Amino acid sequence: MATRAPKDGINEAEIKVGKPKRKAVGLPAVLNSLKISLDQMGPVRSAQTLLAVNQEKGFDCMGCAWPEGDKRHTAEFCENGAKAVAEEATRRTVTPSFFEKHSVAELNERDEYWLGQQGRITHPMLLEEGGTHYRPVSWDMAYDIIVEELAALDSPDEAVFYTSGRTSNEAAFLYQLMVRGIGTNNLPDCSNMCHESSGSALTQTIGIGKGTVSLEDVDKAPLILVAGQNPGTNHPRMLTSLEKAKKNGGQIVAINPLPEAGLLRFENPQKISGILGTRFGGGTQLSDDFLQIRLGGDQALFQGLGKYLLEQEEKTGTVFDHEFIKEHTTGLEEYLQELREVSWDEIVEASGIAKSQITSVGDRMIASPGTVVCWAMGLTQHKHSVKTLRDVVNVLLLQGNIGKPGAGVCPVRGHSNVQGDRTMGIFERMPDGFHDALDAHFSFASPRKHGFDTVAAIRAMRDGGAKVFMAMGGNFVRATPDSDVTDKALRNTRLTVQVSTKMNRSHLITGRRALILPALGRTDRDTQASGDQRVTVEDSMSAVHASRGRLRPPGPDVRSEISIVCELGDRLFARPQSPFRDNAPQIDWVAAQADYSVVRNHIEAVIPGFENYNTRIETGGFVLPNGPRDGRKFTTPSGKAVFTGNALEYPKVPAGRLLLQTLRSHDQYNTTIYGKDDRYRGIHGGRRVVLVHADDLAAAGIAEGEMVHLVSQFSDGVERRAENFRAVTYATPRGCAAAYYPETNVLVPLDSTADVSGTPTSKSVIIRLEKIA
Ligand SMILES: Nc1nc2c(c(=O)[nH]1)N[C@H]1C(S)=C(S)[C@@H](COP(=O)(O)OP(=O)(O)OC[C@H]3O[C@@H](n4cnc5c(=O)[nH]c(N)nc54)[C@H](O)[C@@H]3O)O[C@H]1N2
Ligand SMILES: Nc1nc2c(c(=O)[nH]1)N[C@H]1C(S)=C(S)[C@@H](COP(=O)(O)OP(=O)(O)OC[C@H]3O[C@@H](n4cnc5c(=O)[nH]c(N)nc54)[C@H](O)[C@@H]3O)O[C@H]1N2
Ligand SMILES: [Mo]
């Protein structure tokens, strides 16, 4: 199996490698975002959009899920938020004549960057069986095709309904209702590949699969550990919070295999001093400590921290929060046993961090009245991620660092509404309480058998068990692992339906028939029968607020996700000839489509915490109840937070092999490639690079700049190959390598998933570098 560099993609010989940056943002970031905005939107639209980002009456930035502060700046945006906005609000369009000109085969030769650059899709398009080109199709016909294919299935479990994390609360709620009305829980989502490990670990230990901190907690935290996260690129507005924490006297410890620019130093683009900083050498030193950890070494590190706290507790008796432990937790002994058994040698070996560095962070924790741990994909995408995160919780519980100001767990979410989609029921295994409420309110019986997650859905399509695939946003075939396997799986279906704003690979690797349904985005004005609508989203800290777009949509034939679901729902359930009338959820789809406040009333009736939903979003929104945060209430079976014992695990890499992490460059949004630079890491003009320690390159007899193939080895014996990468020496620990996603997804075996959460192990893939003969 192999992927080649696409035709018009990149000439690796032209990739320029410079010195990685030591700090993030500042003037270059502001200039870069303005350039991209002007290119894509022109001056008037740029101003209209960028001034409305994250404002109370504006739209929610789709760049990330970091919350907005109470005092909003006139331009509450960051470079990468501006890129995400420009990407959607572009004036370029992909019309039927585009599809007439380019066959699917031809488009498949193009790279992700080129596809994305073509612009917004304006018409529903159909690829007929055996067809070479997409042709325009009426909305009515498109809906009829979906209904017909769903009705023809032997079982509703032969259909799969994916969701990406930009979908609004309203659209997500109606979508899951439609899917459960059809009779399946096959609701995989991007979260399965993202923070599922966080959800699994947190639900088990603290009773809720969400973070327990507010923005204020971060601003005021005396100590913040940032592990497995690159905020300078992926959550730039988080740097403002970290800067505030520093100004308030807080300390920051960065835990990362790479010295990421944003973690080290930051120049705030919202402040004149930050913008001028580059010239005057300013900016804020963010990290007090940088632990350059081995890939997958975090469980060892957190066990080391726990072990040190225990050793000091045994000396002084003042390290643990005894009252908290007694009142609010169970399982301490099991955890302490684990800490006593694990040796320092093993901890140091697994993490690659010296004992003295670990104990010095331990001393910071002991001295600190509160600690926050923030994390993202560096902690969630390993085989032992759930264990690792349970050990993060363990350490925090020892000092009572949950449910007090300036302390807690902070999983930093990716997509801007991925957390809200989960709250709305986008999950293949929602708890019974949710189903009971749904059934009662809509007078139907939702299916209780768990559905497919992302990996299970791919297996089912591959093996012929799933025949219709619909996606509410996202780019399933490129976001998922084992690209060659996934491509074949999708091609094995009868119908693929993509509700999308922009072109991507998932429109080109299709079932026997394929539909593209063009959708409105966050920035677009959404006008329905009752007038202009707004939607709502939930950020990483459980705050729910409204989002309203004001730009003219790319064309009259582009529809909102809500309207698409309502039209489908009406045809599936509510008409005399509807195939799923028997057990139909009782809802007026037409009324819901006409006025989204009707949808919010339904949500309020089913999901706790949404009381007076419509009223409260008028006044800036509200924060959902969070037991651990609000009052140290833990909805676990024991009613207490749970310490767990987790035998130490870490990736073991055979000699001559490397452990590869697949990560994001500064110029991409997941599978959307904005450009070919990774400014902070000093890479310019291309993406097929592999970052390796100088000594590892030398040991492999490979010269800096030489071209190599990446070959992954997994227990299934299949050789997975990603070809033609340029070797770049980089400051990563020995034995560890890094390359960009999605070019390297072909290397991630479908069956290599995290225990419990099922997340593909995108941050630990065993590879070897193959010299090109
Ligand atoms: N501009 C932009 N913003 C985004 C996105 C985007 O693509 N572009 N994507 C969005 C989404 S969906 C998500 S989930 C987030 C992703 O946000 P991140 O999680 O920051 O994204 P990654 O690029 O995957 O970076 C992983 C980081 O973890 C480190 N890391 C890798 N493995 C390990 C490990 O074993 N231990 C430790 N301690 N560190 C490790 C890497 O070196 C890197 O710094 O960002 C969101 N925001
Ligand atoms: N190897 C590797 N694989 C990974 C990861 C990794 O770190 N390494 N990260 C994983 C993570 S964290 C995630 S979240 C997934 C991301 O997986 P996805 O969410 O599936 O992927 P995206 O690239 O974010 O999807 C982009 C597409 O969404 C569509 N889109 C954008 N906005 C809208 C909208 O408002 N409405 C609709 N209907 N469509 C819209 C556009 O057509 C665009 O092409 O990838 C995962 N895959
Ligand atoms: Mo994500």
Image (cartoon, rainbow, N blue to C red):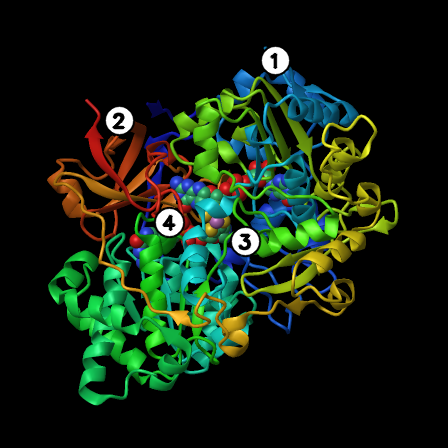
Which numbered tag is attached to residue 719? 2
User: Tag 1 or tag 4, which sits nearer the N-term?
Assistant: 1
User: Is the CB of the residue bearing disc 4 within 8 angstroms of ligand 2?
Assistant: no
User: Tag 2 or tag 4, which sits nearer the N-term?
Assistant: 2
Q: Nearer the viewer, mark 4 or mark 1?
A: 4
Which numbered tag is attached to residue 129? 1
Closer to the camera in the image, 462 or 621: 462
Residue in view at x 27 percent, y 53 percent? 296
Residue 489 against residue 233 in the figure, above or below: above
| Left or right of 621, for residue 284 | left
**CA gap, disc 4 and disc 1:** 39 Å
Question: Which residue corresponds to mark 4?
Answer: 756
Q: Nearer the viewer, mark 3 or mark 2?
A: 3
**CA gap, disc 3 and disc 2:** 39 Å
Residue 489 against residue 421 in the figure, above or below: above
SS category of the residue bearing label 2: loop
Amino acid type of the residue tagged 2 in the rendering:
Glu
**CA gap, disc 4 and disc 2:** 26 Å
Amino acid type of the residue tagged 4 in the rendering:
Val
Residue 670: where, in percent of width, then height?
Answer: 48, 43
Give neighbour class at mark 4: few <14, some 14-19, many 20+ (Cα, 10 Å): some
User: Tag 2 or tag 1, which sits nearer the N-term?
Assistant: 1
Specify the quadrant of the image occupied by residue 152: top right
Residue in view at x 50 percent, y 53 percent? 414
**CA gap, disc 3 and disc 1:** 39 Å
Q: Decide if residue 673 is in sight here.
A: no
The N terminus sits in image quarter: top left
SS category of the residue bearing label 1: loop
Closer to the camera in the image, 248 or 598: 598
Question: Which residue corresponds to mark 3?
Answer: 431
Residue 39 against residue 516 in the figure, above or below: below
| Contact, mark 4 vs mark 2 (Cβ under 8 Å) | no
